[in-house]
Image: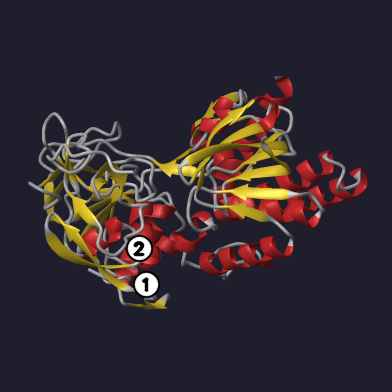
Amino acid sequence: MRIEDHPILGRAERGRRITLTVDGNPVVAFEGEPIAAALLAGGHRVFRYTAKRREPRGLFCALGRCTDCVMTVDGQPNVRTCVTPARDGMIVQTQVGRGKWGGRGGGGKRKG
Amino acid sequence: MARKTEIAVVGAGPAGMAAAIEAGRAGARVIVIDENQRPGGQLFKQIHKFFGSEAHRAGTRGVQIGLDLLREAEEAGVATLLDTVVYGIFSDRCLGLAREHHTEELEADAVILATGASENALAFPGWTLPGVMGAGATQTLIHIHRVLPGKRALMVGAGNVGLIVSYQLLQAGAKVVAVVEGLPAIGGYGVHASKVRRAGVPILTGHTVLRAEGREGVERAVIARVDENWKPIAGTERTLEVDTICLAVGLSPLAELAWMAGCEFRYIPALGGWVPLHDGNMETTRKGIYVAGDLAGIEEASTAMEEGRLAGLAAAQSLGHLTRERGEKKKGEVHKRLAALRMGSFGEGRAISKEQILQARETV
């Protein structure tokens, strides 16, 4: 849920409205906000599943330290979504285990 | 060829910015480095009004103090290097920087570490479920990103962070079902506790969270009373319908760079754990390496800024930008203000702990 009006901070100032593709579905985001913020605003809480026990994980520290919120973004695994700004057209995938270059189960070639 | 500067400040929070401003005003060449995209550290999340005297910006919100620091730093000619991680500190005060997919080095005559703190976690069954998060993380989400992580929250910890963030969750439109605190008494200021209580949130002292339940995220929290040995009392369990559990169980200094630099440490629980020893100039046991703010012992933004000023003045003085007389006079004024901040029932413990650090530093 987004906080549009705040008793102390007033109206929210956000960047340009953009769209991310999250596990194949469009999710509204605002340019520059962390991917994680857009996901939570859109009701997504599970960002990845752990390698051994497939347990769900989500945002924990929101500071880029704990790495609990990592996902596969544009084919690159282990991207810290809490400190990575959203850009229009980003492909975001729920990560399983340590993830794979190129996508969740893709094993495609490393970009760049 | 490594880039060179006179003073490198690691961390653009209240301590680092204050240090940079003082050193810059004294005429030193200063670079502040921060891993975030924006400077200001946690100040921009702190929308509550600060306490203390007028000299400590009482009645001013952290956000405004942050803006003022940015402006003052610019006026003092301070350079900032953002989006840059200081991954290491080597001999001769050379910092290893990682930025924009490459690494570089920065050599400095003096280094001021103001790296801050990280939130402590609390392990209980279900604590890894999505929906369990740091209270500071919640604050970041609601104030910086303007997103609510959930609708119904349980706050764990009734220190100042737990109380303030509980109130801020209410302001942002969430419901705070309860605040649980393992200790028999509330740890934070009475003013904050009263505000939370007046808003109808029960503060349950002598209670802890037993577990979080849910499949793909928090759906419930089970809390219970604890005895004086922190053991849950059978039969007192209660289930709360919540989707978010915020942990406000203390902070620990982010001390990696100070360890790497070879600074001597002392374990002081009242200041958050292992803290680098420092003298009245905030200089560690390594010459030319200073610390300030939460890294030098967990306190508050007001004390962090004063410690930063001390470190900035001392570093500038050591490099000849202030005469001894002028430096000592200015630092004396800061010491007085720091002492005032560490008075009273909340500050006294920290004053004693800080004194321990100074004494231990002298015996090294």
Q: How many marks?
A: 2
Q: Secondary structure at mark 1?
A: loop
Q: Callout 1: few (<14), some (14-19), or many (20+) C-alpha neighbours within 10 Å?
A: few
Assign a secondary structure to mark 2.
Answer: loop
Going 18% across and 65% down the picture, which residue do you hit?
A: A27
Query: Residue under circle 2?
Result: A33
Residue B230 position, x and y percent, is 28, 34
Q: Amino acid at mark 1?
A: Gly
Q: Are marks 1 and 2 in contact (CB under 8 Å)?
A: yes
Give the percent coordinates (x, y) of residue B361.
Answer: 69, 26
Chain to which mark 2 belongs = A
**Any part of residue B354 in sight:** yes
> For mark 2, does the 10 Å Cα neighbourhood hold few (<14), some (14 to 19), or many (20 or more) residues?
many
Q: Nearer the viewer, residue B79 or B214?
A: B79
Indicate the quadrant containing the C terminus of chain B: top left, top right, bottom left or bottom right: top right
Q: Is residue B258 left or right of residue B161?
A: right
Q: Which is more toward the observer, A2 or B3?
A: B3
Percent x, y of residue B9: 64, 45
Answer above or below: position of B79 versus A98: below
Which residue is most to the left?
B215
B231 in relation to B152, above or below: above
Determine whether, in the image, residue B165 is placed left or right of residue A1: right
Instruction: Give the position of the N terminus of chain B as an image quadrant.
Output: top right
Dot placed on the residue nearer the N-terminal end, 1 or 2: 1
**Could one spot residue B340 in this view of the protein?**
no
Q: Residue at x 66, y 36 (%)?
A: B2
Q: Which residue carries the number 1 mark?
A: A15
Q: CA distance from mark 1 to mark 2?
A: 8 Å
Q: Quadrant of residue B123?
A: top left
Quadrant of residue A12 in the image? bottom left
> Residue at point 10% right, 41% down?
B235
Q: Amino acid at mark 2?
A: Glu
